[in-house]
Amino acid sequence: MHRYIIRRMLMLIPVMLGVSFIVFTIMFFTPGDPARILLGERAPAAEIAALRTQMGLDDSFLVQFFNFVRNALRGDLGRSLVTRRPVAEELFARFPATLQLAATAVVIAVAIGIPVGIISAIRQYSLFDGTAMTIALIGVSMPNFWQGLMMILLFSVYLGWLPSSGIGTFAHLIMPAITIGTSSAALITRMTRSSMLEVIRQDFIRTARAKGLDERVVINRHALKNALIPVITVIGLQFGYLLGGAVLTETVFAWPGVGRLMVDAIRQKDFPMVQGGVLLLALAFSAVNLIVDILYAYIDPRIKAQYK
């Protein structure tokens, strides 16, 4: 098991190097001069040239990339061109808000998706199943930003029950978490139903029922555990996606997370902030995938047995 975990952790190294290279390449060839952005459009050419030399912008692409990776390994992601503060400090100040939003949304998605998916599989082609799958299809198809705006219009403008934006209390968290949690709940519902339908038709489920076991024991102990692998995969991917993909939702609800910070950085051409933000979110996504892989080994003994 330890070898399995170490192997999965070592695989993060080429992934992060690849992400770093892609992000750095995109930002390197993006129009705009960081030195001119720092000093302003009216700064003398001599001062801009001196600052470019000081920042290492006159070096070749490979030299700049090497320096970026070396500094990133030491936790130095540079300084923001707008706030002049360290990028790492800005990102880690915003990341807890993004993590809180994503974690709450995943809890909502799991609490809705797994039970509804199980019931839909048990009662296949029933009214409940048809209604649940229709709602799930609507949830998958509905754009998050549109849903967020509609929720603000209903619960904040018309009813006045919830605050429309910001952070601070649990009430501020409800609408953005539901907005990004419902689409994930729809995906989890569909995957749980599909996986459960496949498992409950297996011979070992028929054997368990033939032994006279209670139906709840058959479903919860035998069927659900064997159906969890693809469901956990979807949950892990959704959590990673929410960490990096809640940009529009954070913008709509003025949620001070990493996604909103990156949107502002892109608008202001704050290259170091964009590079650092993408790198942090890629690392978080990779860490979530690592946790999912480890959970596989604990849920499915066959995976654990391969590394004994």
Image: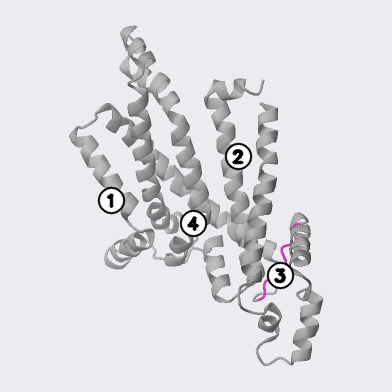
Instruction: Examine the image and state in which quarter residue 59 appears.
Output: bottom right
Q: Secondary structure at mark 4?
A: helix
Regarding residue 93, the answer to whether it shows in the image is: no
Q: Which residue is mark 4?
A: 245
Q: Image point 24% across, 28% down: which residue?
A: 123
Please give the range of residues in magenta.
75-81
Q: Which amino acid type is marked by label 2? A: Leu
Q: Which amino acid type is marked by label 1? A: Ile
Q: Which amino acid type is marked by label 4? A: Gly
Q: Name the spot of residue 136 as percent of width and height, x first.
A: 30, 45
Label 3 crowd bin: few (<14), some (14–19), many (20+), radius 10 Å: some
- Could you tell which of marks 2 and 1 lies nearer the N-terminus? 1
Q: Image point 65% across, 53% down: which residue?
A: 18
Q: Nearer the viewer, mark 3 or mark 1?
A: 1
* Residue at far top of view: 211
Quadrant of the frame with the C terminus: top right
Label 2 crowd bin: few (<14), some (14–19), many (20+), radius 10 Å: some
Q: Which residue is mark 2?
A: 290
Q: Nearer the viewer, residue 206 or 150?
A: 206
Q: Nearer the viewer, residue 34 or 167?
A: 34
Q: Which residue is mark 3?
A: 79
- Could you tell which of marks 3 and 1 lies nearer the N-terminus? 3
Q: Secondary structure at mark 3?
A: loop
Instruction: Examine the image and state in which quarter residue 73 appears.
Output: bottom right
The CA distance from mark 3 to mark 1 is 43 Å
Label 4 crowd bin: few (<14), some (14–19), many (20+), radius 10 Å: some
The CA distance from mark 2 to mark 3 is 30 Å
